[in-house]
Image: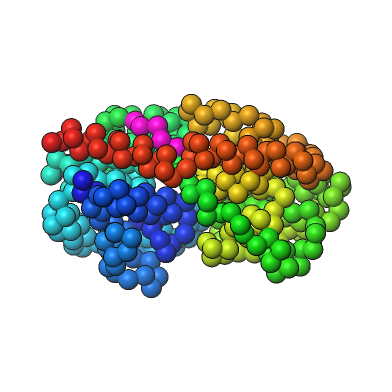
Amino acid sequence: MRIAVVNNFFPPRVGGSSHLSDALARGYAAAGHEVLVLTAAYEDAPAEEERDGLRIVRLPAAMIPKSRLSVSFDIAFTLRRGAYRRVAELLDAFRPDVIHQHGQFFDLTWLTGLWARRNHVPALLSVHTRLENPTAAYHGVFRVLDATMVRPALRLYRPRMVVMDVQMDDYISSRYRGAYSGLDYIPVGVDPDWVLHGDGARVRERHDLGDAPLVVSLGHVIPLRDRLLLVEAMPEVLARHPHARLLVVGRVYYDPFLERARELGVGHAVLAVGPVPKEEVPGYLAAADVETHDLQGYGLGTASLESMAAGVPMVVAVRPDNFPGIELVSGENVVLTPEGDAKALGATLADLLDDAEWRARIGKAEQALVRERFSMDAVLRQHLETLEAMAAGRR
């Protein structure tokens, strides 16, 4: 097959959507398929490059200012005079059998969707992010944008959609009804090996942590993962483990959690280290006793699965049926905590820090679960089966 992979976010830009689309694209190429990647320009990344069997074309883009409306992300859009003509030239020359798009609200998705409709090429769309915001006013704006811009754009070509968890299933069914041709339930995939064998001692030395009990929280800090509940749980943790530390690892786009830590008198125990290179993440996981960041009912993302693959006990606020057909059992292959209950979260974190044997059992069970159901090999096979069926249907 000839597969066009489309995502405004792509390495060297970091993030779950970026890494997953890159891993899948490389997997398609390794399986013998021709792959063209269309993405937005980012910093000093080359406009065109070839690597890992991929041809990557980065189109000129403008960054929109970070704001609460953009969920505090810096988002690059390529929509400008001549953008569709350039996209059409690239796709006309490549002649894809199928297009795999990532992100329903990006302009490259809409442009390639328009081309797909005009050329009768099937499209598969992975929806990574729900247009939601904890602030009521912004949430209303997002609903309007979904209804007036995103859904009409998708209705033009009606892609099949990849559903990664139950929250996304509910969201797609309610927001985009009539704008897709079918749903495929495929969880997010991770490489379970790259997070292993990190140098935890080096990380502890770098941040002067000694042998302090350590809670690590991976991922960008945005309103939908604001770390406020985690900071509010720290007094409970510190009451039982006075030397415990919380390490927030990721770019801080939204910082009220730092002020809240000062208000609660736990600022000394909370350290935001900012973004780190991907190759350093295994070291932070090796240093951690516990990892937690998915605490606002938003689902269980890539960073959580990678933490599980590293064997670090995960505390998350999700439903046991978060992934259709996959059971999460609290205290066995993950630790579930009630959404919005800081006291319960603090007690759970302290209990885990109390019991090294329990942490080890959970870590091993997490690793087994990730390898069986969330490994990139397993997820890649499901994507290829879907894409091959779509391409065969076109033929």
Q: Residue furthest bottom?
A: 44
* Image mark count: 0
Residue at 25% over, 49% down:
33
Residue 9 appears at what percent x and percent y?
39, 56
Closer to us: 17 or 333? 333
* Residue 368: quarter of image: top right
Q: Is residue 22 above or below residue 372?
A: below
**Figure quadrant of the C terminus:** top left
Q: Position of residue 374 (x, y in %)?
A: 48, 40
Q: Which residues are magenta?
A: 183-187
Q: Is residue 332 above or below residue 90?
A: above
Is residue 276 shown in magenta?
no
The answer to whether residue 27 of the structure is visible from this angle is yes
Residue shown at 61% from the left, 39% from the top: 366
**Main secondary structure type of the part rendered in magenta:** strand
Instruction: State the scheme by which the image is colored.
Output: rainbow
Left or right: residue 150 compared with residue 367: left
Q: Position of residue 90 (x, y in %)?
A: 18, 58
Residue 287 shown left or right of residue 138 in the figure: right
* In front of the other: 345 or 310: 310
Q: Residue at x 29, y 67 (%)?
A: 49
Image location (x, y in percent) of residue 134: 56, 43
- Regarding residue 116, the answer to whether it shows in the image is no
Name which residue lies at 38% across and 58% down: 10
Q: Is residue 106 above or below residue 126?
A: below
Residue 284 appears left or right of 39: right
